[in-house]
Image: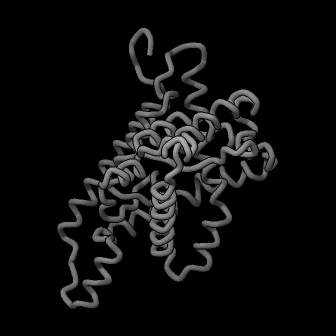
């Protein structure tokens, strides 16, 4: 950022993603006014259960995103899997996970989960040192397994409802709560504030690109199976997204561990 106080490329890319996704969300919300709500009891119950009032537009965006992915990101992810051995890909994923630890830690704190925050802190400390800058997940074997904590989960813990289902370009399955949480995670990531010079911006931007490819590579088999076997891939992905999100939130909320022994609190 010095001397012109310009943000890093990753931060600008993140802002661009958030801005585009936000614009898409506003567009979808505008279309929602034209959506027809069923009047019969059975149709209305199904409509409310799906919580997808923007479904016609969401489906269009899903189909467009699927076609774009098929000719761009998926081939790159397939080439990555072909060229890079599994141990190396695992190491890359571990490094990216370690770099995300500060944002996970702050979300743990905001969720009022001190034990989870302690786990995240220890994972970052151990893996950044003994784990060779995060390449090896040594902390998992030492009793500090990884967990998910993001801005959407934090907002859920604060009582904010999910809102209607959204399928957004570049971001995929989402919701107004998840979209807001995504912006929070961007703000919480320390690497988005690296200074200019010394190749840090280039490194930051490269890490951002690698994280996209790594995440897509991890979904190659599962996503192909969904598209191959599901009668309606869009509806299946919507259901799987909600199940995964709700499961992660419940796991977080059910974690009542304290950072002191039980006998001390008595």
User: In this picture, is 135 found above or below 81?
Assistant: above
Residue nearest the viewer, comparing 261 with 169: 261
Q: Nearer the viewer, residue 171 or 182?
A: 182
| Drawn side of residue 49 relative to residue 192, left or right | left
Figure quadrant of residue 223: bottom right
Question: Farthest residue in the top direction?
Answer: 3
Quadrant assignment, res 131: top right
Relative to 28, say whether 88 is above or below. Answer: above
Instruction: Give the image location of residue 58, x and y in percent.
Output: 36, 66
Residue occupying image coordinates x 42% and y 52% = 153
Residue 238 % position (x, y): 45, 69
Asked whether the viewer can see residue 78, the reply is yes
Residue at figure coordinates x 63%, y 35% from the top left? 122
Q: Is residue 13 above or below residue 145?
A: above
- Residue drawn at 66 percent across, 52 percent down: 77
Task: Quadrant for the N terminus, please.
Answer: top left
**Left or right of residue 177: residue 39:** left
Q: Is residue 48 left or right of residue 127?
A: left
Residue 36: % across, % down: 21, 78
Any part of residue 89 in sight: no
Q: How is the image coloured?
A: one colour
Is 139 situated above or below 194? below
Q: Is residue 98 left or right of residue 113?
A: right
Residue for point 68% across, 29% down? 128
Q: In the rendering, at what x and y percent does residue 80 appear?
A: 72, 48
């Amino acid at each position: 950022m010095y001397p012109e106080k310009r943000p890093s490329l990753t931060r600008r890319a993140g802002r661009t993603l958030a801005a585009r996704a936000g614009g898409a969300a506003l567009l979808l919300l505008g279309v929602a006014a034209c959506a027809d709500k069923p009047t019969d009891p059975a149709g209305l119950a199904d409509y409310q259960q799906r919580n997808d009032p923007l479904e016609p537009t969401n489906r269009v965006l899903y189909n467009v995103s699927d076609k774009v992915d098929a000719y761009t990101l998926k081939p790159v992810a397939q080439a990555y899997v072909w060229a890079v051995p599994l141990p190396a890909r695992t190491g890359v994923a571990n490094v990216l996970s370690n770099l995300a630890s500060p944002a996970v830690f702050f979300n743990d704190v905001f969720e009022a989960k001190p034990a989870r925050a302690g786990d995240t802190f220890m994972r970052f400390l151990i893996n950044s040192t003994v784990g060779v800058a995060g390449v090896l997940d040594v902390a998992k074997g030492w009793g500090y397994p990884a967990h998910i904590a993001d801005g959407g989960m934090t907002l859920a813990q604060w009582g904010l409802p999910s809102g209607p289902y959204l399928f957004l370009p570049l971001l995929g399955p989402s919701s107004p709560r998840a979209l807001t949480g995504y912006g929070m995670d961007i703000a919480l990531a320390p690497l988005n504030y690296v200074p200019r010079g010394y190749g840090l911006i280039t490194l930051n931007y490269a890490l951002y690109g690698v994280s996209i490819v790594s995440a897509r590579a991890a979904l190659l088999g599962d996503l192909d199976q969904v598209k191959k076997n599901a009668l309606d891939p869009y509806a299946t992905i919507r259901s799987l997204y909600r199940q995964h999100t709700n499961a992660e939130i419940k796991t977080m909320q059910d974690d009542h561990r304290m950072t002191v022994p039980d006998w001390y609190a008595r």
